Every structure is written in C-alpha cells, then in structure tokens.
Amino acid sequence: MPQPKSKRKKMTAPRFVDLKRAGERIAMLTAYDFPTAKLLDDAGTDSILVGDSLGMVVQGHDSTLPVTLDQMIYHGEMVARATEHALVIVDMPFMSYHVSPQQAIENAGRIIKETGADAVKLEGGESMADTIAAIVGASIPVFGHIGMQPQSVNTYGGFKVQRHEDQLLADATAVEQAGGFGMVLELIPRELAAKVTASVSVPTIGIGAGPDCDGQVLVTPDMLGQFQDFKPRFVKHFGNLHDAASLAVRDYIAEVREGAYPDDEHSHA
C-alpha cells in the first residue's frame, strides 16, 4: 500500500536511483494540472511526469510535436505547486533542446526555475549524450527516454515497437554515462526491455515495455479510462471515469431541465 502522506519524504533524483538499488518497484503517472497532481501525490505515486503527451490528451493534437516550451512551463508550474512528495519531471518539448547543448541548458533552466520541478526529461540516447551531459553539468537532473520516441514519430512513420537491440543497449548506456538518473523505455519487446534494464544501474520506467523494467508509467487519462476511442495494447483501465463522468453530467442536465436542482438544500435562505 502507498505510504501515508504524513510519513513520506520528498522524492529526489538520488532517492529515485536508490529505489532501484533497493529492488523497489517505481510508480510514475502523468499530470498536467493542479487537482490531478494533488490527487496523484496524495495517493502515493513516486513520480509525476508533466508529459508533452498533453499535446494529445489535453490539447487534442495527433502528436506531441505542436507543444511549446511556454506551454510545458505553464502546466509544469501547476503540477509542481500541487506536489509535496513525488518527484516532478517536466518534458522538454520538440525543438527545445535539439539545436545545441547551450540551447538545451537555457531551456532546461527555464523549466526548473519557472516551474519549481525537480528534473527535466528529453528523448534520445547516443545522439543526445552531449546534451544530457551539458544539462547535468548545469546542476539540472535529467531523465532520459529511449525506444519509441514520440517526438520522432515522423521519422519512424508512426508509433512503432522498437526492436534494435544493439542500438537500444547503446542508447541506455549513453544516457547513464552522460549523467541521466534514469530513463523511460517506450514500446520495446519485453525480453529486450529486461536486457536494457539489467545493463544499467539507474532506473528504467516502462511504457509498453513489459513488467521487467524497474517501474512503470502510464498517461493518467488513459489509466483512468477517460478516453474510449483509442486504447493501446499496454494500457490497462484502472477506472472508468468516462462512464462515471458522463452519467453525472447527464443527471445534472436532467435535474436542471426538470427544475429539481437546485432545491432548498442547495439554496441560500
């Protein structure tokens, strides 16, 4: 069971690494606003990711590519302000770190300074090793992301399972050696994800990468069943907020139209 809020310490990047060393499974979820972040933090999640997935689940785009740095900062600040215990990681959006390590340092610095988050996350392994090292060198913790990289969706030709073992192992090693304190493994076959996890001393957090990673992350609206039109193979609905919320809204509309709400109990004398 999650530890009671009053007894939980603030999660930090070094403590996050210690969880792997202790053999403890790590739970991570996404949040994009104050009430969701507070709910997740109170429930005991280890980490909250302010993902650029907000481009799809909040803004309604078909990819993460349109999300801007200012938008990530806007959402990240709300999440960090709501969170007392979980480690808050904010995604660096597309083209906010690709031009140069100097650009990456400046934008990562903006995220940390303006949101109050604990770390940033960026996509890429070997190709981004120098950039990760530069940001870490500026005293900003960095979480990596290898395997399927949503910001490269146009290069992949869609959201596809990544199976190139040598490259994935090289990418994982590069992230760790550059100073990353962990990494997301996305859309990787189970056995390969297990090999990657065993090859590094920092935590791996899987999404569509099987049960052998050090932890798991899901997009919270997916996990709660808020969307019914699309359900990836790796998503499990731990709730059905879509139907529950729809029923509540229908009841509200009916009572307003019937004149049943507000009644005396919900009116001021």
Image (spheres, grey):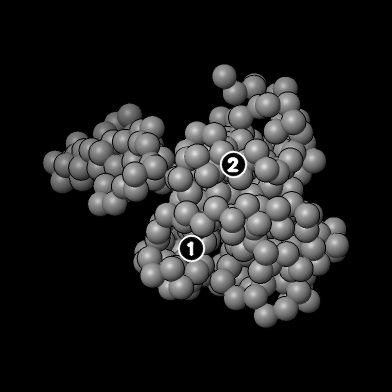
Q: Relative to residue 80, is residue 211 depicted above or below?
A: above
Among the 4 quarters of the image, the one containing residue 20: top right
Name which of mark 1 and mark 2 comes first in the sequence. 1
Residue that appears at 35% across and 36% down: 237
Among the 4 quarters of the image, the one containing residue 125: bottom right
Q: Position of residue 106 (x, y in %)?
A: 76, 73
Nearest to the observer: residue 67 or residue 114: 67
To which residue does mark 1 refer?
150
Q: Where is residue 168 in the image (x, y as percent from the top left)?
A: 58, 55
Q: Residue 262's mark? A: none
Q: Is mark 2 on a helix, strand or loop?
A: helix
- Few, some or many residues within 10 Å of mark 2 (<14, 14–19, 20+): some
| Residue most extreme to the top | 1
Q: What element carries label 1?
A: helix
To which residue does mark 2 refer?
195
Mark 1–mark 2 Cα distance, whole angstroms, equals 22 Å
| Residue most extreme to the bottom | 99
